[in-house]
Image: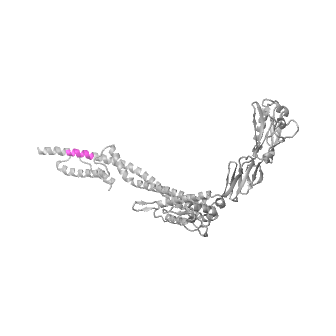
Amino acid sequence: MEPSVTQCRVAQLSSALPGRLSPAQSGSRRSGNERRWAQAEVIAVSIGIPPLMTGTNQLEELIKKYMELESRPVADLKAAKQALTTRAAMFRDLNSSLLSLKNASGDLVPEDLTSLYGARTATSSNADVVAGKAGASAAMASYSIFVERLASYDVVVSNTFTSTGTEISQASGEGTKTFTITAGGTSWDIAVQVVAGQDNATVLANMATAINASAANTAAGAAVVSEQAGTSRLVITAKSTGSANAITLAEAGGTNNILAASGTSSSAQSSGTTGGYLAARDTLDARFTLNGLSFVRSSNEVSDAISGVTLTLKRAQATGDAPVSIEVKRDTSAVKAKIKSFISSYNATIKYINNKTLVDPDAGIRGDLAGDATYLELKVKMNRVVQGRVDGLAYPDPTRLYDIGITLDSTGNLVLSDEAKLDAALSDHPEAVRDLFTSATGVAVKMRDLMDPFVQDLTGIIARQQQSITNQIDRIDSRVKDLEERLAIREKALRSEFSSLIRAMQLMSAQSALLNSFMTQANAAFMY
């Protein structure tokens, strides 16, 4: 039992001794003081301080020991807070695991079921020449394609000029020159300022800058090139392929026009250093044969030749090359990957819950959720979902996961025990597999709905449990703060009280020594 401050003070107050004692009084008085001295020593020893301690270090040690005793409630509260913090972390991990399973289940139930369970793939025998991409609506079939010509970009150039010459500015005259550029059915007016005596390189550069700075830049871009050192030539290039996006140039007036002065024309084909378009307009479109039929398109991305299939033409073939085969078939890779992800998420979640609800008396193990009926029931329901039959489905269609090669092992984990069986079901009966997961009582739907009440952000079961823990921690923090403030005041008071006690003990020790000395002298005198 801890000594009270009152007991310490009694020992202190009862320690006063007279300066002189008569031989008759000495025995009785000495006996009483020794009893009081012993009482003070017992008080010190009871809280871990050796008897007769004196000085600053002893005082600090005495206060330290006493405060350790009085601080035990704070330590207990902090330990409780740490336990709650650990439990909160456990619930965060649990929420993450359940949410992962919910998402994996939801991935098997997309808004557009056909895009997942009816997916198609287009496989090319030579993807360097032509590649294919199939949508869910594409019919499963094979196609033979021969690429005769790729679609190309129209290019219009000016005459070639000596860069330092002034032929263009002399022919066009000074002032603002305006011309029109048309591409893809849209026209834009381009204004260029020409200064008298301006060299050819500068005039052509100003034309390119004006085109690129205008709205026409969405359809065409311009640049000045030097085919040979000291020469300049304007090049205007369409930004989309095909004859439909060919460039047309025009300007008003018959003289002093900048297009005419620079030889930049879309009405004639360029030859050597003269301006015009580089490629014949009827060669700008892609040309290919599909199952013997001839097709012409403005783009190398062709989405209207085969319903549901987009072809990408990459390289023209030479005469005598073998046609490329495009085969459209079911694509089971995406749904199979999502099924495997579902299995993995289920196993991770059930393992976590099993660990947290485990009770092993022999090993002294008791999980954080041991005995919690909510999560024990959740385990049972999860097991029923993956093992049970789906209502509304009947043989020969699969009615449970076992029918597509997914089983439970001895540890309760899902296992893809027969992958060939799953592949066959996805290839031959994709709609049946879809219904197994996505019908009203399908595996993925039921698992997703089972997880949902637990993982809702604010109102979910786990969210409410985490909020309860947070509230408990807040109350502990408030209590600890209050106790620590009181302990600070208590320590200050103890420092004062124990200082007085130690001074009293020191005085008692001195008086005891004086009494012993006196008695020794008296005894010696008596003997003589």
Q: Quadrant of residue 179?
A: top right
Numbered range of the magenta stretch: 507-516
Residue 103: image x %, image y %?
A: 58, 58
| Magenta highlight on residue 514 | yes
Quick one: 4 or 457, which is closer to the camera? Answer: 457
**Where does the C terminus fall, quadrant-wise?**
top left
Give the x, y percent position of residue 343.
Answer: 55, 60
Q: Residue furthest front?
A: 320
Q: Height in image: 61 above or below 346?
A: above
Q: Main secondary structure of the magenta part?
A: helix
Which x, y percent locates residue 526? 13, 45
In the figure, residue 344 lies in which quadrant? bottom right
Taking 125 as reference, is 225 above or below it? Answer: above
Query: Observer-nearest residue: 245 or 309?
Result: 309
Give left or right: position of 522 versus 90. Answer: left
What scheme was used to colour the molecule? one colour
Res 56 → quadrant: top left
Residue furthest to the left in view is: 528
Image-based side of 38 in relation to 434, left or right: left
Residue shown at 25%/44% (left/top)?
510
Q: Is residue 298 left or right of residue 441?
A: right
Across the whole image, how many numbered discs are drawn on residues?
A: 0
Q: Quadrant of the N terminus?
A: bottom left
- Furthest residue to the right? 254
